[in-house]
Image (spheres, coloured by chain):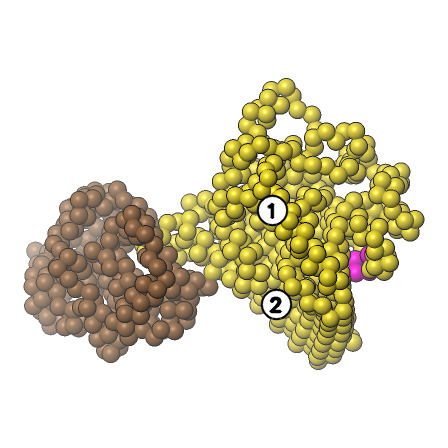
Chain colours: A brown, B yellow
Amino acid sequence: MLQIKDLHANIDGTEILKGLSLHIKPGEIHAIMGPNGSGKSTLASVLAGNEDYEITGGSVAFGDKDLLELSTEDRAREGLFLAFQYPVEIPGVSNINFLRTAVNEIREYKGEEPMSAGDFLKLVKERSALVELDGKLANRSVNEGFSGGEKKRNEVFQMAMLEPKLAILDETDSGLDIDALKIVAQGVNAMRSPERSFVVITHYQRLLDYIVPDFVHVLYKGKIVKSGSKELALELEARGYDWIKEEVSA
Amino acid sequence: MAYAGDDELLEHVTGKEYEFGFTTNIESDKAPPGLNEDTIRLISQKKNEPEWLLEWRLDAFRVWSEMVEPEWAHVQYQKPDFQAISYYAAPKKKAQLNSLDEVDPELRRTMEKLGISMEEQKRLSGVAVDFVLDSVSVATSFKEKLGELGIIFCSMSDAVQEHPELVKKYLGSVVPKTDNFYAALNSAVFTDGSFCYIPKGVRCPMELSTYFRINEAGTGQFERTLVIADESSYVSYLEGCTAPSRDENQLHAAVVELIALDHAEIKYSTVQNWYPGDENGKGGVFNFVTKRGICHLRSKISWTQVETGSAITWKYPSCILKGDHSVGEFYSVAVTNKRQQADTGTKMIHIGKNTNSTIISKGISSGYSQNSYRGLVQINKSAKNARNFSQCDSLLMTDHCGAHTFPYIEVKNSSAKVEHEATTSKIGEDQIFYCLQRGINEEKAISLIVNGYAKDVLNKLPMEFAVEAQKLLAISLEGSVG
């Protein structure tokens, strides 16, 4: 599904990713943890195609495609979805119009007919229920005036609408209370399937109680320095990152 | 306009009708360049005008001769040589083409993007076809229907001949013939335009548009429009067209006057898409327009404009709120790209009691363009309990463009409430990235974001105009962010 090999990336001349490798198979959930500034969000941005970052080495295969060769929109159309840490507001553009444009652009890329208005609305109803999103939010402007929790639920709702092959959740749990966290997790779990993979970037083990990962990786100084099962997350919660930092520098 | 031999050949081969379509075979009936009293006498005589109108024109000319071209607008340009312009040409036909294949492919692509139908494309680009008969018959039945209601909708020239009493009463009543430099020039030399009269109590059942005046569809250089809504009547008037129009005339100085008598309502919508000039600011139309309406008791005038064309736009559609409880509205989207310069806004003059005005202005600047909002809200002593709300937003697409806001507020009655809000923002790279990440390409992303930004204004346009205007915004800004 996703094969990252020795990836290096800079922003403004500073190297953030320093040889990161990661292999994700279909249906797997990988959690990425690590101290602040270790490069977690950079990884998400680089995979999504943010042009603020310069790739200086390594490769990323997405299915049978060279991900780094694809434009940002084509990565999305190939099935890569990023749930933003800070979802962007687009005043005057209704959530529903935004999503319909996205859905039909992706369908066009795949050579499919645009979705009919009826089918689309049915899907909206079904998928917004997954994250208990108020139907009214669908008609409001994209993320405008949404609470923090609503924005994050809206990200998961969009993911559910676009049905990606790979979803990257960038600190989707940040700023959520426990109830909202459960709702977001419930939405993600509903979308789990043997073909769909997830990368869950988080600071806190708490989210992983609800979205149970197959693998947990620790990202530190731009590299994955430790990988393990979900128990690693518990250990990090208990012991912090210092022991890992020591291991790395030893 | 002289063409070298090579150019002529090239023109012929590529069929760029818009560049010289307006100037074919008119030499024989065209006034020599230059402006003096004789030119005006010639115009008046050619148009068989009554004596009073000639005097009116001459008055305007004498005042204009003493006037100085204004320089206060935030625009820079080479002032036109008014003696180099020819002020009269006999009504002319566009060069006719045999099929759409002969039309400039670039022009056609734009029309297709706008979603303009084949028939409409043919009409706009002057292709000779039988189908045009359909539009003629539509126009005929349209005119019959209006006639039954007593609505007069004709060219200004016809109005002068057929309804001189109305013309005499209202022409220059809102924009005096010596109002400003360009209005005075227009008053002296206008050759045609539109005239519309809605009788008492009549609600015009359709949008009136110059579209239906088939033979007069071309834009005049000095156009004069007069719309009179008699007591308790209603009319919605559409001016312009979303299709790109190229014009040999660099200078345009139109005057539009609206008169809303007691309890009447006029909705005036404009889409302006004249040639903006090339990347370097070469060519392009200078658009100096004076538009003003007067509201009598409990009447309402609503201006809505989408301005995307012209090299220079100098335009302030205004309302004189003379009658008590009258309402003035101004909704504007002005897009500038490349080297375009726009200085546009409105004036709301509150005279009557309990008058109310609303201004929503959305400027979008891209490329190296300059986009200014200039507006006056004037509450006079007599305007007890007047209200105004103004919102002026600017959206910047690049680092090289400029957005400026010049609001003037004059309040002479302490019971007035005046609110002004303004914002300036740069189109977010984060917004575009967000759209791209959802699979939406950059062109569509910009279209979504810009249309969202301008939504409050676009919503005010009549339905059929709104859809084309949305596409027009996207096209005008193509390749803006890179």
Magenta segment: does it hold B175?
Answer: yes
Q: Which marked residue is nearer to the observer: mark 1 or mark 2?
A: 1
Which kind of residue does numbered mark 1 sit on?
Answer: Asp
In the picture, residue B392 is in which quadrant?
Answer: bottom right
Return the mark for residue B134.
1
State the residue position of label 2. Answer: B390
A6 shown above or below B142: above
Residue found farthest to the top: B5
**Where are the magenta residues, as a range?**
B171-176
B359 shown above or below B287: below
- In the rendered view, does B440 fall on the left or right side of A171? right
- In the rendered view, does B215 fall on the left or right side of A172? right
Residue displayed at 26% across by 64% down = A160
Front residue (pair A102, B347): A102
Main secondary structure of the magenta stretch: loop
Residue B57 visible in the snapshot = yes
Front residue (pair A224, A230): A230
Residue B375 visible in the snapshot = no
Residue B187: give x, y in percent of width and height: 81, 49
Which kind of residue does numbered mark 2 sit on?
Answer: Ser
- In the rendered view, does B101 fall on the left or right side of B246? left
Tell me if mark 2 has few (under 14), some (14-19) or many (20+) residues whose alpha carbon lies within 10 angstroms of its own. Answer: many
Residue B313: give x, y in percent of width and height: 65, 49
B413 shown above or below B340: below
Residue displayed at 31% across by 67% down = A122
> Who comes first in sequence, dot 1 or dot 2?
1
